[in-house]
Image: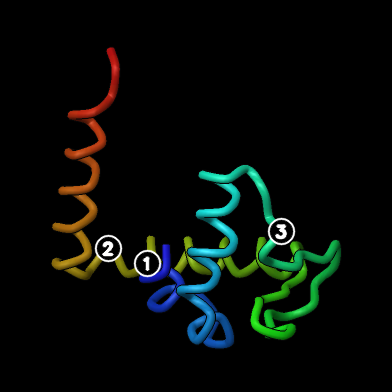
């Protein structure tokens, strides 16, 4: 996710890519909490609040939509991205249950 943010998302998210991954994605998926990131119900841009990140959920959603669109546009012509995406797909297929 951090690499996706660094390469596909709006530039103000780039310096926070590792924190978004650790404090948002990992906390949410593995710990089922978001205590280490401040998420607001609006469209405020990402920023540091103390030592943690804060962002508006509506802004984050828009960044993910734009990042996904950027990824899909790049995928059409970037051979390295195509290879990496195909390898990841094959890896997921191997672990999928029938």
Please state which of residues 30 and 13 is positioned toward the viewer in this rendering: 30
Give neighbour class at mark 2: few <14, some 14-19, many 20+ (Cα, 10 Å). Answer: few
Give neighbour class at mark 3: few <14, some 14-19, many 20+ (Cα, 10 Å). Answer: few
Q: Element at badge 3? A: loop
On residue 73, the disc is 1
Q: Is residue 5 left or right of residue 47?
A: left
**Can you give x and y, in whole percent of width and height, for residue 77 in the image?**
22, 69
Residue at horizontal 57%, vertical 45%? 31
Q: Is residue 90 left or right of residue 98?
A: left
Residue indicated by mark 2: 76
Give the Cα distance between marks 2 and 3. Answer: 38 Å
**Can you give x and y, in whole percent of width and height, for residue 97 in the image?**
29, 17
Q: Answer above or below: position of 80 versus 35.
A: below
Residue at horizontal 32%, vertical 69%? 74
Residue indicated by mark 3: 35
Residue at horizontal 68%, vertical 80%? 46
**Can you give x and y, in whole percent of width and height, for residue 83 in the image?**
14, 57
Give the Cα distance between marks 1 and 2. Answer: 6 Å
Q: Is residue 32 left or right of residue 71?
A: right
Residue at horizontal 59%, vertical 60%? 24
**Can you give x and y, in whole percent of width and height, for residue 82 in the image?**
19, 59
Please state which of residues 44 and 68 is positioned toward the viewer in this rendering: 44
């Amino acid at each position: 996710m951090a690499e996706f943010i660094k390469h596909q998302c709006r530039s103000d998210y780039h310096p926070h890519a590792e924190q978004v991954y650790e404090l948002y994605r990992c906390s949410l998926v593995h710990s089922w909490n978001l205590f280490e990131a401040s998420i607001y119900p609006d469209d405020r841009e990402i920023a540091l609040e103390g030592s943690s990140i804060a962002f508006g959920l509506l802004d984050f959603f828009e960044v993910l939509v734009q990042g996904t669109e950027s990824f899909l546009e790049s995928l059409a012509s970037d051979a390295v991205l195509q290879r990496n995406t195909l390898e990841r797909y094959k890896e997921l297929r191997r672990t999928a249950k029938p």
